[in-house]
Amino acid sequence: MDSTTALTAFAALSQEGRLEVFRLLVKAGPDGLAAGKIAEQVGRAPNTLSAQLNLLQQAGLIDSRREGRSIIYSACFDQISDLIVYLLEDCCAGEPCVASSVQAAADRALCCAPTTSTSS
Amino acid sequence: MDSTTALTAFAALSQEGRLEVFRLLVKAGPDGLAAGKIAEQVGRAPNTLSAQLNLLQQAGLIDSRREGRSIIYSACFDQISDLIVYLLEDCCAGEPCVASSVQAAADRALCCAPTTSTSS
DNA sequence: TCCATATTTCAATAATCGCTGAACTATAGA
DNA sequence: TCTATAGTTCAGCGATTATTGAAATATGGA
């Protein structure tokens, strides 16, 4: 991931409403949520939400697919991964104190959810 | 780290000029750089830079100390750590695909710079 | 004390951002 | 084809943000 892409991602996550939507989609997992369902859960007008989803999508943080009359949005875990790795490698290269904290967190995450096949 | 703090950090990193300054300070390491030196390197007016430094500091991403007539800014690695862990744990909890990429990156970082005097 | 250096603060302007109402597109079903 | 449903796009406004010049603060040295 290059700096420009990271910048766009940070900008997308830098507003309360968008961060809330993003976290909701991450929790929803790969199945995602319909736009209307999201609007309902975060209590925002559909057009306002649409703009927020657009920005997150342009940043590559979420994906969309049509399903009947609904459009389903889901988190793009690859991009999130890349963003974290960017922060760690490109921003904080060679800082063991950062790397070891992050390593510990990754260990915890993997230890609690070790089966990468089908869970959640 | 709570969402509000993370939001502030994202906002601070979401502008080209500030991200550039932040990356410069991370590369400079714990010794940091004087404000004037930074202004020179990024080619910005001192007052513009001062505002950018202020925002990064308010977000807890950088620290400052006076040294003679200069004010030295340095990256706050703890906060960066916390931000990465927030992204991994709070935003992406239970997503092994993210955790394993991050774990691999942390391993690489630690393998290349293993001697931290005291293993934290 | 006076001056030079290093940096910040202040006020003002220009640009950007976020939200809203209204109109538009796409799909499903009768 | 007509209607209802699900979302999006667009124009406009109000609010926030970034930058700038000028003035202010803090330190060091003559």
Image: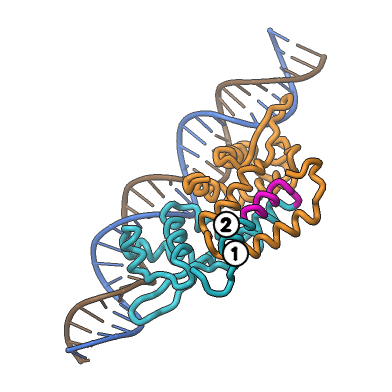
Chain colours: A cyan, B orange, C blue, D brown
Marks 1 and 2, how far apart at CA:
7 Å
Q: Is residue A54 visible?
A: yes
Where residue B101 appears, as percent x and y from the top left, is 65, 64
**The disc label shown at residue B88, or none:** 2
Question: Is B32 included in the stretch rendered in magenta?
Answer: no
Residue at left offset 49%, top offset 46%: B2
The answer to whether mark 1 and mark 2 are in CB contact below 8 A is yes
Could you tell me which chain the residue with mark 1 belongs to? B
The earlier-in-sequence mark between 1 and 2 is 2
Badge 1 amino acid: Val
Residue at left offset 37%, top offset 62%: A49
**The disc label shown at residue B2, or none:** none
Could you tell me which chain the residue with mark 2 belongs to? B
Q: Quadrant of residue B43?
A: top right
- Category of crowding for the residue at label 1, using alpha-carbon neighbours closer than 10 angstroms: few (below 14), some (14–19), many (at least 20): many
Where residue A67 appears, as percent x and y from the top left, is 38, 80
Residue at left offset 59%, top offset 71%: A116
Secondary structure category for the residue under label 1: helix
Where residue A62 appears, as percent x and y from the top left, is 49, 68
Residue A84 as seen in the image, left or right of residue A37: right
Q: Which residues are magenta?
A: A94-105
Residue B84 lies, with reference to residue A24, above or below; the image says above
